[in-house]
Image (cartoon, helix red, strand yellow):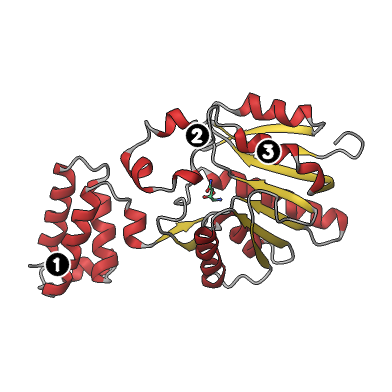
């Protein structure tokens, strides 16, 4: 079989199986499995493909037809220009999360400059580590601790720190703050926030293959915000910032949770699609 046919047949199989973005997915699999770039493809399109590679490619296509996520098949995905290994133990990094990380970077840079001191940053529920590692990489002076209840997820995050050659980072295996003994200047978190009922309605890629533990925010989706905010007093320094990613309809509720605890400067930020996506608050000295 020739490259051109490989691409076409893969696209057709995925399309017939009702996979969204069939063309894109087939391309990514060709690039990954054949080890060629798009440009190389156009030079090689009439060349014969090794039989072993053909078998591997169609095995991957068959896997994708079961709605198994493309990112897990490929094993690596990009987040804010950095590579992250992914497997079924971690949530696949989403573009939506960039808003959270961009805002955190802005605050960290500003505060580092203002205080003339290096900041400590916690990434609570780190998963693949995409948030903590990106922050550590882009703010080499910050000290980042990545926390997760899943040891399997932490192992992926550790590999990702190595992959990105990040050294200003550490990892804590902990159910929320249980094993956390320190206070931080910044807490960032993208906790599980989908209601248990909504999880059932998600696309099969997410519902059947991404870790439920990383998605399910219990009955009203707010369980983790409540718990993280309730005990934030013991883990966030005075004048520290807390930043959350939220679901599109959780802005008001998470804002209220922060307000109740005496946070100030509370802001809700929107994502690229115009949906509420991030909530920030600052810890005041006197109230929290
Ligand atoms: N922090 C990771 C991410 O943003 C994982 C989040 C999670 O598991 N809920 O992708």
Horizontal side of 281 relative to 150 (left or right) equals right
Specify the label residue 194 is tagged with: 2
Q: Residues within 10 Å of mark 3 (few under 14, many from 20)?
A: few
Q: Secondary structure at mark 1?
A: helix
Q: Give the distance between the C-alpha atoms of the residues marked 2 and 3, in whole angstroms.
A: 15 Å
Specify the label residue 55 is tagged with: 1
Q: Residues within 10 Å of mark 2 (few under 14, many from 20)?
A: many
Which of the 4 image quarters holds residue 229?
Answer: top right
Residue name at image x 65 percent, y 53 percent: 123
Residue name at image x 76 percent, y 43 percent: 232
Which of the 4 image quarters holds residue 76?
Answer: bottom left
With respect to residue 102, does 226 lie above or below? Answer: above
Horizontal side of 54 relative to 170 (left or right) equals left
Q: Secondary structure at mark 2?
A: loop
For label 3, the residue is 227
Q: Residues within 10 Å of mark 1 (few under 14, many from 20)?
A: few
Q: Secondary structure at mark 3?
A: helix
Horizontal side of 46 relative to 226 (left or right) equals left
Q: Is mark 2 within 8 Å of ligand 1?
A: no
**Residue nearer the viewer, 267 or 206:** 206
Specify the label residue 123 is tagged with: none
Q: Are marks 3 and 1 in contact (CB under 8 Å)?
A: no
- Where is residue 62 shown, x and y percent of the image? 18, 54
Q: Nearer the viewer, mark 2 or mark 3?
A: 3
Which circle's residue, 1 or 2, is located before the other in the chain?
1
Q: Quadrant of the C terminus?
A: top right
Q: Nearer the viewer, mark 3 or mark 1?
A: 3
- Where is residue 146 shown, x and y percent of the image? 64, 58
Q: Are marks 1 and 2 in contact (CB under 8 Å)?
A: no
- Where is residue 80 shown, x and y percent of the image? 52, 55
């Amino acid at each position: 079989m020739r490259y051109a046919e490989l691409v076409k047949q893969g696209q057709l199989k995925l399309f017939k199986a009702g996979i969204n973005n069939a063309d894109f997915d087939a391309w990514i699999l060709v690039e990954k499995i054949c080890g060629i770039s798009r440009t190389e493809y156009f030079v090689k399109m009439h060349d014969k493909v090794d039989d072993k590679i053909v078998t591997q490619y169609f095995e991957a296509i068959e896997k994708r037809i079961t709605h198994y996520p493309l990112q897990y098949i490929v094993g690596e995905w990009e987040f804010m220009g950095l590579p992250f290994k992914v497997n079924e133990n971690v949530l696949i990094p989403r573009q939506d999360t960039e808003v959270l990380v961009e805002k955190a970077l802005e605050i960290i840079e500003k505060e580092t400059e203002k205080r003339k001191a290096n900041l400590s940053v916690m990434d609570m529920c780190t998963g693949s580590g995409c948030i903590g590692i990106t922050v550590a990489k882009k703010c080499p002076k910050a000290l980042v601790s990545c926390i997760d209840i899943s040891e399997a997820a932490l192992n992926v995050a550790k590999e990702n720190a190595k992959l990105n050659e990040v050294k200003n980072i550490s990892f804590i295996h902990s159910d929320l703050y249980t094993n956390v003994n320190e206070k931080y200047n910044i807490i960032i978190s993208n906790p599980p926030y989908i209601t248990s009922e909504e999880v059932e309605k998600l696309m099969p890629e997410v519902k059947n293959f991404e870790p439920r533990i990383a998605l399910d925010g219990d009955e009203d989706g707010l369980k983790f915000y409540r718990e993280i905010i309730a005990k934030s007093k013991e883990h966030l320094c005075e004048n520290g910032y807390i930043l959350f990613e939220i679901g599109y309809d959780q802005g008001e509720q998470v804002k209220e949770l922060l307000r109740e605890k005496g946070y100030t400067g509370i802001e809700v930020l929107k994502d690229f699609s115009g949906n509420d996506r991030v909530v920030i608050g600052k810890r005041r000295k006197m109230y929290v």
